[in-house]
Amino acid sequence: MFEKELPIVGQFGAEDITRGVCRYLWSLGYSPLTEFKLTSNRRVDVMGLNSKGFYIVIEVKSSVADFRSDDKWRDYLPFADQMYFAVANGFPIEILPEECGLMIADAYNAAILREAKIVRVNAARRKTQHVQFAKTAASRLYRMDDPRY
């Protein structure tokens, strides 16, 4: 017999969770980018950069099946000073790895349930990532002004 995943009451989808996480990061002084491509060619759900050059990565999980089918999150660790999972209220948080922080989010905001430990990004990677982050943000802004590109 296959175990059927039941929907969580009031469950929010990945877009809603991402929006709440970005709003929360903004309130903390981070500039968030969604679907940020790392130099490793992996793409993180949300990456935030603060005024001190500190990087936070958030992996959004909208269902248990989504979490169980994706183990790429370990590849994000070298690119983050802190790494979090963000899930909707009602998600079975006990299945999430304890080495990462934990956020509960909806479409409007997020809250930290478990603080992530700080593991500094190495200096060379940080410098390269600053340039990549700035270019990505500038390109997205430009495309808003001129949709042809």
Image: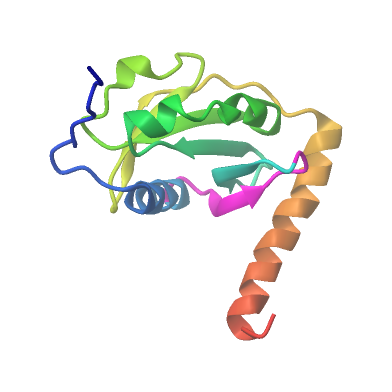
Residue 12 point in image, percent of width and height: 26, 46
For the point 70% across and 69% down, the residue is 139
- Quadrant for residue 111, please give it: top left
Q: Is residue 20 left or right of residue 12?
A: right
Residue 142 point in image, percent of width and height: 67, 77
For the point 82% across and 42% down, the residue is 127
Counting every numbered tag in the picture gives 0
The type of colouring in the image is rainbow
Vertical placement of 130 versus 66: above or below?
below
Q: What is the residue that sits farthest to the front in this orientation? A: 1
Q: What is the residue that sits farthest to the right in this orientation? A: 124
Which image quadrant: the N terminus? top left
What segment carries the magenta color?
A: 27-40
For the point 66% across and 85% down, the residue is 148
Q: What is the residue that sits farthest to the left in this orientation? A: 9
For the point 71% across and 44% down, the residue is 38
Q: Is residue 64 left or right of residue 141?
A: left
Of residues 135 and 64, the one drawn nearer to the viewer in this rendering: 64
Of residues 19 and 29, the one drawn nearer to the viewer in this rendering: 19
Residue 40 point in image, percent of width and height: 76, 38
- Is-magenta flag for residue 100? no
Which image quadrant: the C terminus? bottom right
Q: Is residue 78 left or right of residue 128?
A: left
Q: Is residue 42 left or right of residue 22?
A: right
Of residues 132 and 8, the one drawn nearer to the viewer in this rendering: 8
Residue 124 point in image, percent of width and height: 86, 35
Vertical placement of 68 versus 63: above or below?
above
